[in-house]
Image: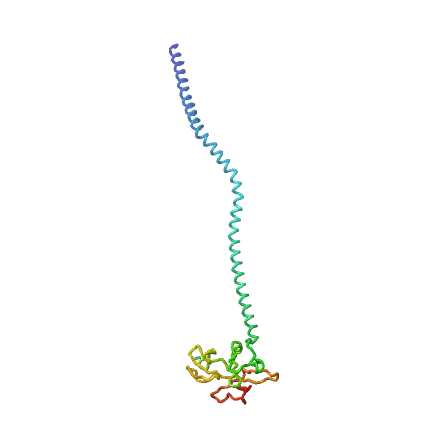
Amino acid sequence: AAAAKKGAEAGAGGGEAAAAKPTSKLEAARAAATAQAGSPAAKKEPKGASASAATKPTRPAAKPERPKSAGAGAAGPTRRTFFLLTWFGVAWAAFIAGCSAAVLAGVRFLYPNVLEEPPSVFKVGPPDRFEEGNVYEQWKNEYGVWLVRNNGALYAIRSVCTHLGCTPNWLEAEQKFKCPCHGSGFRKTGVNFEGPAPRPLERYAIAIADDGQVQIDKSKKFQQELGQWTEENGAVIKVG
Ligand code: FES
């Protein structure tokens, strides 16, 4: 019996020892697990904690960003509205410009075209102002007229070539009018003598006005080939 008791005690002791061994193994395993969890997990946990702690403060920051994104979304319609308004404004501006142009054209149509032309009748001074044998060109550009004193007569020659209408030049050295276009030449009297011009230059009416000045009237023209270069017609005045 004693031996059995010892055996039982020994068995119980062995069981406790066996029970203690597994406990220590579990504890060792837990310790190892906690050690493992302690080192990386402990490091992870702070990271997780810090991450969670970081996300927690950022989430409230992200919340205000949503209105920003909503604001950016609202900027899209704003740009579209801006472009629509711009195109609308451009269209209106073009419409108003077109209407204004039409109105101006209509108003302009109501008024006649006015050409600033010199008067057809003008005075050139007293007859003794002009010397024998001279051709006076100071009225050529404005009035298209040469005034000539030749052989005791004054006459006004129209400065238009009878070929195709160019303006001849007076060549003092050669004592002739010369057309630069096709080479027609006219004597001091206006009679053609070279080139393609078919007839003499024309003359304007000339007279002594009431104030004693020589007056030229461009509304009347005379042609030599028609026998119109007479004093009676007013194509020439005698000045002695
Ligand atoms: Fe004067 Fe032809 S236009 S010669």
Above or below for 50 versus 192: above
Which residue is at the front of the view, 226 or 78?
Answer: 226
Report if residue 167 is visible in the image.
no
Report if residue 191 is visible in the image.
yes
Q: Quadrant of residue 18?
A: top left
Which residue is at the front of the view, 100 or 173?
Answer: 173
Which residue is at the front of the view, 215 or 135?
Answer: 135
Q: Quadrant of residue 194?
A: bottom left
From the viewer's perspective, tell me whether residue 18 is left or right of residue 115: left
Q: Quadrant of the N terminus?
A: top left
Q: What residue is rendered at 52% in x and 61% in y?
A: 90
Q: What residue occupies the far right of the structure in this picture?
A: 211
The colour style of the image is rainbow
How many discs mark residues in the rendered view? Answer: 0
Q: What residue is rendered at 49% in x and 89% in y?
A: 227
Residue 216, position in %: x, y? Answer: 55, 82
Q: What residue occupies the far top of the structure in this picture?
A: 2
Which residue is at the front of the view, 229 or 8?
Answer: 229
Q: Quadrant of the C terminus?
A: bottom right
Q: What residue is rendered at 54% in x and 63% in y?
A: 93
Residue 107, position in %: x, y? Answer: 57, 72
Above or below for 102 versus 131: above
Residue 236, position in %: x, y? Answer: 53, 86
Residue 78, position in %: x, y? Answer: 53, 53
